[in-house]
Amino acid sequence: MIVRVPASSANLGPGFDALGMALTLHAEVTVGPSADGVGAEVADTHHPATIAFRRNGGEGEIWVRSPIPAGRGLGFSGAVRVAGLVAAHAQRHGDDAAKLQAAKPELLRLATELEGHADNVAASLYGGVIATAAGRAVRVPMPFDSAVVMWVPSLSTSTDESRSKLPESVPWADAVYNVGRTALLVAALAAGDIDALRAATEDRLHQERRLVRSPTSRAAIASALAAGAWAAWLSGSGPSVAVMCSPAEAATIAASLPVDGHCKSLRIDHIGAEIVTGGVMPQPPGE
């Protein structure tokens, strides 16, 4: 059995620690010595997937393959932690989809405890666009299709270090600004109001402070919007930038982004963590 878990983009602009989007770029984990799929490696005891696997009672070795770049704002640690937790669940319960679905609230609790915040892990666990707070996760319905172009630079960012530089308090006006934008974003996604997405993904709590240290990311956001993207935001703590746009315009928008980064043309993953039966890890197409 192979556990397959999507990457994620967190915050979506204003929804700091509360919104996450699952992406069609996947980490895969399997248990035991026969997991000799292409690109899979044994995870050592310090790997976040192994720590999560042990935390949920998993026994034995696990193998991991992940094209999700670490330290770039695509939820690598969240995805592999969810994968480790689900692998331990699969070791006990097999590939029963109903049992996995029933276990997800507890898996979310464990993943949030390990990750420190729920936005990435909730998206990777449940799929789609997820609103999360108070230990709960609710999927935001989306009546339209969207491409997600991820602009990924070569430099990396430490999430812990980035979060440590954020202020302990913010002006009242900025808090109100973000509450309004977050509410507008959830409503726009659910209603299919594409025209509202650009304003709805604006932020005053974290992006500006982080973009000061990553001016090329700021340029990528500006270039994407100028090229006709519906919305663009700093993905998680960055430095990657997520761009929502029409699938027909994804290639054009990707070509407009700064050359000192590469682009991944993705979609929203609406499945989330899943257990797939099979002999070895297949080579994932297009990843």
Image (cartoon, rainbow, N blue to C red):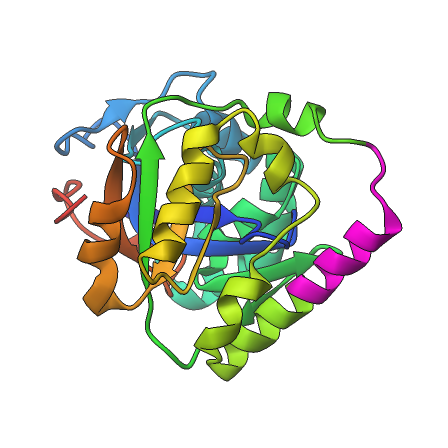
In the image, is residue 47 above or below residue 125?
above
Viewed as shown, does residue 147 lie left or right of 205? Answer: left
Residue 237 image position (x, y, % from top left) = 54, 35
Identify the residue at image location x=80%, y=59%: 176
Viewed as shown, does residue 279 lie left or right of 61? Answer: left
Quarter holding the C terminus? top left
Viewed as shown, does residue 138 lie left or right of 217? Answer: right
The front one of 199 and 133 is 199
The front one of 92 and 124 is 124
Residue 207 quadrant: top right
Identify the residue at image location x=64%, y=33%: 209
Residue 54 image position (x, y, % from top left) = 52, 29
Viewed as shown, does residue 223 lie left or right of 82? Answer: left
In the image, is residue 24 above or below residue 76?
below
Mainly helix, strand or loop, the magenta region?
A: helix
Residue 179 among magenta residues: yes
Residue 27 quadrant: top left
In the image, is residue 35 above or below residue 278?
above
The reply to whether residue 273 is visible in this rendering is no
Q: In the image, which residues are magenta?
A: 168-181
Residue 79 among magenta residues: no
